Protein backbone atom coordinates (compact mmCIF):
# COMPACT_ATOMS: atom_id res chain seq x y z
CA UNK A 1 0.00 0.00 0.00
CA UNK A 2 2.86 2.32 0.87
CA UNK A 3 4.41 1.73 -2.52
CA UNK A 4 1.14 2.59 -4.23
CA UNK A 5 0.80 5.83 -2.25
CA UNK A 6 4.42 6.75 -2.96
CA UNK A 7 3.93 6.11 -6.65
CA UNK A 8 0.77 8.22 -6.70
CA UNK A 9 2.55 11.05 -4.85
CA UNK A 10 5.45 10.94 -7.27
CA UNK A 11 3.05 11.01 -10.19
CA UNK A 12 1.22 14.02 -8.72
CA UNK A 13 4.46 15.90 -8.16
CA UNK A 14 5.59 15.15 -11.68
CA UNK A 15 2.31 16.42 -13.09
CA UNK A 16 2.49 19.57 -10.96
CA UNK A 17 6.06 20.19 -12.08
CA UNK A 18 5.07 19.78 -15.71
CA UNK A 19 2.27 22.34 -15.32
CA UNK A 20 4.60 24.84 -13.65
CA UNK A 21 7.24 24.34 -16.34
CA UNK A 22 4.74 24.82 -19.16
CA UNK A 23 3.38 27.99 -17.51
CA UNK A 24 6.88 29.39 -17.09
CA UNK A 25 7.82 28.64 -20.69
CA UNK A 26 4.64 30.25 -21.96
CA UNK A 27 5.29 33.29 -19.76
CA UNK A 28 8.87 33.52 -21.01
CA UNK A 29 7.67 33.32 -24.59
CA UNK A 30 5.19 36.12 -23.93
CA UNK A 31 7.84 38.25 -22.27
CA UNK A 32 10.28 37.62 -25.09
CA UNK A 33 7.63 38.48 -27.66
CA UNK A 34 6.79 41.73 -25.83
CA UNK A 35 10.47 42.63 -25.54
CA UNK A 36 10.96 41.96 -29.23
CA UNK A 37 8.18 44.38 -30.21
CA UNK A 38 9.80 47.21 -32.13
CA UNK A 39 8.97 50.82 -31.29
CA UNK A 40 10.19 54.06 -32.89
CA UNK A 41 12.67 56.24 -30.97
CA UNK A 42 14.68 59.34 -31.77
CA UNK A 43 18.44 58.75 -31.94
CA UNK A 44 21.38 60.93 -32.89
CA UNK A 45 22.17 60.49 -36.57
CA UNK A 46 25.62 61.97 -35.91
CA UNK A 47 27.55 63.46 -33.03
CA UNK A 48 25.68 66.39 -31.44
CA UNK A 49 27.75 68.87 -29.48
CA UNK A 50 26.84 70.07 -25.98
CA UNK A 51 24.97 73.37 -26.02
CA UNK A 52 23.13 72.63 -29.28
CA UNK A 53 19.63 74.21 -29.28
CA UNK A 54 16.78 71.73 -29.65
CA UNK A 55 15.69 73.61 -32.78
CA UNK A 56 19.01 72.68 -34.43
CA UNK A 57 18.84 69.06 -33.26
CA UNK A 58 16.02 68.27 -35.70
CA UNK A 59 18.46 67.97 -38.61
CA UNK A 60 20.84 65.79 -36.60
CA UNK A 61 18.51 62.98 -35.49
CA UNK A 62 16.68 60.11 -37.10
CA UNK A 63 13.95 57.64 -36.14
CA UNK A 64 15.15 54.15 -35.30
CA UNK A 65 13.15 50.99 -34.54
CA UNK A 66 14.33 49.25 -31.35
CA UNK A 67 12.87 46.51 -29.11
CA UNK A 68 10.57 48.02 -26.50
CA UNK A 69 12.72 46.60 -23.69
CA UNK A 70 15.64 48.72 -24.93
CA UNK A 71 13.79 52.04 -24.88
CA UNK A 72 15.56 54.31 -22.39
CA UNK A 73 13.47 55.76 -19.56
CA UNK A 74 12.65 59.42 -20.24
CA UNK A 75 13.16 59.17 -23.97
CA UNK A 76 12.09 62.15 -26.08
CA UNK A 77 9.25 61.25 -28.41
CA UNK A 78 8.74 64.70 -29.92
CA UNK A 79 11.34 67.47 -30.23
CA UNK A 80 8.58 69.98 -29.52
CA UNK A 81 8.73 68.74 -25.93
CA UNK A 82 12.28 70.13 -25.55
CA UNK A 83 11.76 73.36 -27.51
CA UNK A 84 13.82 76.21 -26.06
CA UNK A 85 16.25 73.83 -24.35
CA UNK A 86 19.84 72.92 -25.26
CA UNK A 87 21.87 69.73 -24.96
CA UNK A 88 23.89 69.53 -21.76
CA UNK A 89 26.44 66.98 -22.98
CA UNK A 90 27.69 65.61 -26.29
CA UNK A 91 25.37 63.02 -27.84
CA UNK A 92 27.14 60.23 -29.72
CA UNK A 93 25.87 58.66 -32.93
CA UNK A 94 23.07 56.20 -32.25
CA UNK A 95 22.35 57.50 -28.73
CA UNK A 96 18.69 57.80 -27.84
CA UNK A 97 17.44 61.30 -27.04
CA UNK A 98 16.34 61.62 -23.40
CA UNK A 99 15.04 64.59 -21.43
CA UNK A 100 17.96 64.31 -18.99
CA UNK A 101 20.29 65.46 -21.79
CA UNK A 102 18.45 68.78 -22.23
CA UNK A 103 18.18 71.83 -19.98
CA UNK A 104 17.18 75.48 -20.00
CA UNK A 105 20.36 77.37 -20.98
CA UNK A 106 19.51 80.22 -18.59
CA UNK A 107 19.20 77.80 -15.68
CA UNK A 108 22.46 76.10 -16.65
CA UNK A 109 24.24 79.42 -16.78
CA UNK A 110 22.81 80.44 -13.43
CA UNK A 111 24.04 77.19 -11.89
CA UNK A 112 27.54 78.12 -13.06
CA UNK A 113 27.18 81.59 -11.56
CA UNK A 114 26.87 83.21 -14.98
CA UNK A 115 23.79 84.69 -16.60
CA UNK A 116 23.62 86.11 -20.11
CA UNK A 117 22.60 89.77 -20.15
CA UNK A 118 19.26 90.13 -21.99
CA UNK A 119 19.18 92.42 -25.03
CA UNK A 120 18.42 96.04 -24.21
CA UNK A 121 19.60 95.80 -20.60
CA UNK A 122 22.69 96.89 -18.71
CA UNK A 123 24.16 95.82 -15.39
CA UNK A 124 23.79 97.90 -12.23
CA UNK A 125 25.21 96.78 -8.88
CA UNK A 126 23.68 97.55 -5.50
CA UNK A 127 25.56 97.13 -2.22
CA UNK A 128 23.13 96.61 0.62
CA UNK A 129 22.91 95.29 4.14
CA UNK A 130 21.85 91.60 4.07
CA UNK A 131 18.35 92.27 5.45
CA UNK A 132 17.73 94.60 2.51
CA UNK A 133 18.78 91.89 0.04
CA UNK A 134 16.68 88.91 1.17
CA UNK A 135 19.20 87.96 3.82
CA UNK A 136 22.02 87.62 1.31
CA UNK A 137 20.63 84.43 -0.26
CA UNK A 138 20.14 85.80 -3.79
CA UNK A 139 21.94 84.01 -6.61
CA UNK A 140 22.44 84.54 -10.33
CA UNK A 141 19.25 83.74 -12.21
CA UNK A 142 16.86 84.85 -9.46
CA UNK A 143 14.06 87.28 -10.29
CA UNK A 144 13.55 90.07 -7.79
CA UNK A 145 11.56 93.21 -7.07
CA UNK A 146 13.14 96.54 -6.13
CA UNK A 147 11.25 98.53 -3.49
CA UNK A 148 12.14 102.18 -2.80
CA UNK A 149 11.09 104.12 0.30
CA UNK A 150 10.89 107.92 0.34
CA UNK A 151 9.28 110.85 2.14
CA UNK A 152 7.77 111.61 5.53
CA UNK A 153 5.49 109.84 6.23
CA UNK A 154 7.42 107.14 4.41
CA UNK A 155 5.92 105.73 1.24
CA UNK A 156 7.27 102.46 -0.15
CA UNK A 157 6.77 101.61 -3.82
CA UNK A 158 7.63 98.61 -5.94
CA UNK A 159 9.76 100.61 -8.38
CA UNK A 160 10.79 97.73 -10.64
CA UNK A 161 9.64 94.10 -10.72
CA UNK A 162 10.70 90.83 -12.35
CA UNK A 163 14.36 91.91 -12.48
CA UNK A 164 17.04 89.38 -13.40
CA UNK A 165 19.97 88.94 -11.00
CA UNK A 166 23.16 88.42 -13.02
CA UNK A 167 25.60 88.16 -10.11
CA UNK A 168 25.42 88.12 -6.33
CA UNK A 169 28.30 88.33 -3.89
CA UNK A 170 27.29 87.08 -0.47
CA UNK A 171 28.28 88.75 2.75
CA UNK A 172 31.44 87.48 4.46
CA UNK A 173 30.42 87.52 8.11
CA UNK A 174 33.83 86.30 9.35
CA UNK A 175 35.73 89.08 7.60
CA UNK A 176 33.19 91.66 8.74
CA UNK A 177 33.60 90.53 12.35
CA UNK A 178 37.41 90.69 12.15
CA UNK A 179 37.55 94.13 10.54
CA UNK A 180 34.56 95.67 12.25
CA UNK A 181 33.12 96.56 8.86
CA UNK A 182 29.38 96.54 8.21
CA UNK A 183 28.36 93.28 6.59
CA UNK A 184 27.05 93.91 3.06
CA UNK A 185 25.80 92.11 -0.03
CA UNK A 186 26.46 93.24 -3.60
CA UNK A 187 23.75 92.29 -6.10
CA UNK A 188 24.10 93.02 -9.82
CA UNK A 189 20.89 93.46 -11.82
CA UNK A 190 19.98 93.50 -15.51
CA UNK A 191 18.03 96.71 -16.05
CA UNK A 192 16.83 98.75 -18.98
CA UNK A 193 18.20 102.32 -19.02
CA UNK A 194 14.87 103.61 -17.70
CA UNK A 195 14.82 101.05 -14.87
CA UNK A 196 18.45 101.78 -14.05
CA UNK A 197 17.67 105.47 -13.63
CA UNK A 198 14.85 104.69 -11.20
CA UNK A 199 16.92 102.24 -9.13
CA UNK A 200 20.01 104.47 -9.00
CA UNK A 201 17.82 107.42 -7.99
CA UNK A 202 16.39 105.28 -5.21
CA UNK A 203 19.89 104.42 -3.98
CA UNK A 204 20.87 108.09 -3.99
CA UNK A 205 17.76 109.63 -2.47
CA UNK A 206 15.90 106.90 -0.60
CA UNK A 207 16.16 103.43 0.88
CA UNK A 208 16.18 100.31 -1.29
CA UNK A 209 14.93 96.85 -0.35
CA UNK A 210 14.96 93.79 -2.62
CA UNK A 211 12.39 91.02 -2.65
CA UNK A 212 12.66 87.54 -4.13
CA UNK A 213 9.74 86.94 -6.48
CA UNK A 214 8.59 84.61 -9.23
CA UNK A 215 8.30 85.98 -12.76
CA UNK A 216 4.72 87.16 -13.32
CA UNK A 217 2.73 88.71 -16.11
CA UNK A 218 1.91 92.26 -14.97
CA UNK A 219 -1.48 91.96 -16.65
CA UNK A 220 -2.27 89.07 -14.29
CA UNK A 221 -0.98 90.87 -11.19
CA UNK A 222 -3.28 93.78 -10.23
CA UNK A 223 -1.43 94.29 -6.91
CA UNK A 224 -1.14 97.94 -5.88
CA UNK A 225 2.56 98.28 -5.06
CA UNK A 226 2.25 101.60 -3.18
CA UNK A 227 2.31 101.03 0.57
CA UNK A 228 2.41 103.77 3.21
CA UNK A 229 4.45 102.82 6.26
CA UNK A 230 4.93 104.52 9.60
CA UNK A 231 8.43 103.21 10.31
CA UNK A 232 11.24 105.74 10.45
CA UNK A 233 14.10 103.24 10.20
CA UNK A 234 14.97 103.84 6.52
Image (cartoon, rainbow, N blue to C red):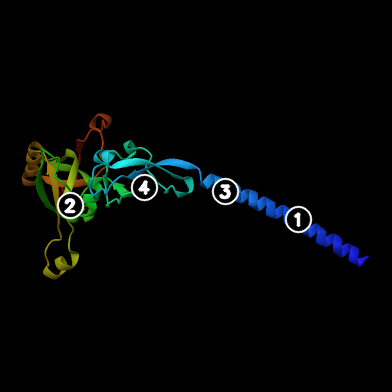
User: Is residue 202 shown left or right of residue 33?
Assistant: left
- Is the residue under label 2 in contact with that under label 3 (CB below 8 Å)? no
Residue drawn at the location 15% of the way across and 67% of the way down: 175
Residues packed near mark 4 inside 10 Å, few (<14), some (14 to 19) or many (20 plus): many
Q: Pick whichever of labels 2 and 1 is earlier in the sequence.
A: 1
Looking at the rendering, which quadrant does residue 52 occupy?
A: top left
User: Which numbered mark, 2 or 1, is in the foreground of this view?
Assistant: 1
* SS at badge 1: helix
Residue drawn at the location 11% of the way across and 69% of the way down: 179
Residue nearest the observer in this picture, 195 or 211:
195
Residues packed near mark 3 inside 10 Å, few (<14), some (14 to 19) or many (20 plus): few
Give the residue pinned by disc 1: 16
Give the residue pinned by disc 4: 96
Q: Pick whichever of labels 3 and 1 is earlier in the sequence.
A: 1
Q: Which x, y percent locates residue 222?
A: 26, 30
* SS at badge 4: loop
Residue lying farthest to the bottom in this orientation: 178
- Say which mark, if any, is on residue 31: 3
Instruction: Examine the rendering and report whether any part of residue 142 can be seen.
Output: no
- C-alpha distance separating marks 2 and 1: 68 Å
Looking at the rendering, which quadrant does residue 160 occupy?
A: top left
- C-alpha distance separating marks 3 and 1: 22 Å
Residue lying farthest to the top in this orientation: 219
Q: Pick whichever of labels 1 and 4 is earlier in the sequence.
A: 1
Instruction: Examine the rendering and report whether any part of residue 202 can be seen.
Output: yes
Q: Pick whichever of labels 4 and 2 is earlier in the sequence.
A: 4
Give the residue pinned by disc 2: 114
- C-alpha distance separating marks 3 and 2: 49 Å
- C-alpha distance separating marks 4 and 3: 23 Å
For the N terminus, give its image quadrant: bottom right
Residue drawn at the location 73% of the way across and 52% of the way down: 19
Amino acid sequence: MRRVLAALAALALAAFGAVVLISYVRGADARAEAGARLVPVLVAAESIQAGTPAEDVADLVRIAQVPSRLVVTGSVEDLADVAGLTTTTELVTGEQLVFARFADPAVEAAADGEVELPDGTEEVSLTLEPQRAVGGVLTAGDRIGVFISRGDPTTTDLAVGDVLVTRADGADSETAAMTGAVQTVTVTLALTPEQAAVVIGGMEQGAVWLSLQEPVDPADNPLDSSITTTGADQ
